[in-house]
Amino acid sequence: MKIPRVLIIAGSDSGGGAGMQADLKTVSALGAFGMTAITALTAQNTTAVYGVVEIEAESPGRRSGDDRQEWRTVAEAGRR
């Protein structure tokens, strides 16, 4: 049996209770494999957000042709 893959596009929560970290927990609990595209980094805790840094579209991690091809493959598989 193939394990379903899910592309998660979200911000990263440094506290781990929301954003991409929470999405990964949910995807894992549902028996799928989570792949991530991080859009922002935060400095926060359970009571406040102290800072947000957006990930630029031209950052090195977002230029990898191999990654984009894999994401397209995952997106196409999700439509089937």
Image: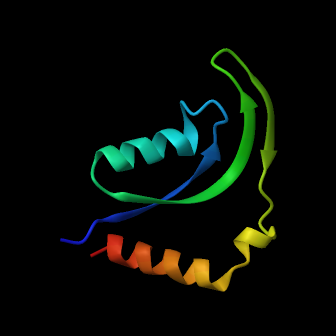
The residue positioned farthest toward the front in the image shown: 1
Q: Which residue is rendered at x = 28% and y = 48% of the image?
A: 30
What colour scheme was applied to this rendering of the protein?
rainbow
Q: How many marks?
A: 0
Q: Which residue is rendered at x = 78% and y = 50% of the image?
A: 54
Q: Position of residue 51 (x, y in %)?
A: 81, 32
Q: Which of 51 and 31 is in front in this view?
A: 31
Q: Nearer the viewer, residue 71 or 31?
A: 31
Q: Which residue is rendered at x = 73% and y = 44% of the image?
A: 41
The residue positioned farthest toward the top in the image shown: 47
For residue 32, side relative to residue 40 (left or right): left
Image quadrant containing the C terminus: bottom left
Image quadrant containing the N terminus: bottom left
For residue 58, side relative to residue 73 (left or right): right
The image quadrant of residue 58 is bottom right
The image quadrant of residue 69 is bottom right
The image quadrant of residue 5 is bottom left
Whether residue 4 is situated above or below residue 28 in the rendered picture: below
Q: Where is residue 76 in the image (x, y as percent from the top left)?
A: 39, 78
For residue 50, side relative to residue 14 (left or right): right
For residue 23, side relative to residue 43 (left or right): left
Q: Which residue is rendered at x = 63% and y = 30% of the image?
A: 15
Q: Position of residue 49 (x, y in %)?
A: 74, 25
Whether residue 16 is situated above or below residue 35 in the rendered picture: above
Whether residue 64 is situated above or below residue 3 in the rendered picture: below
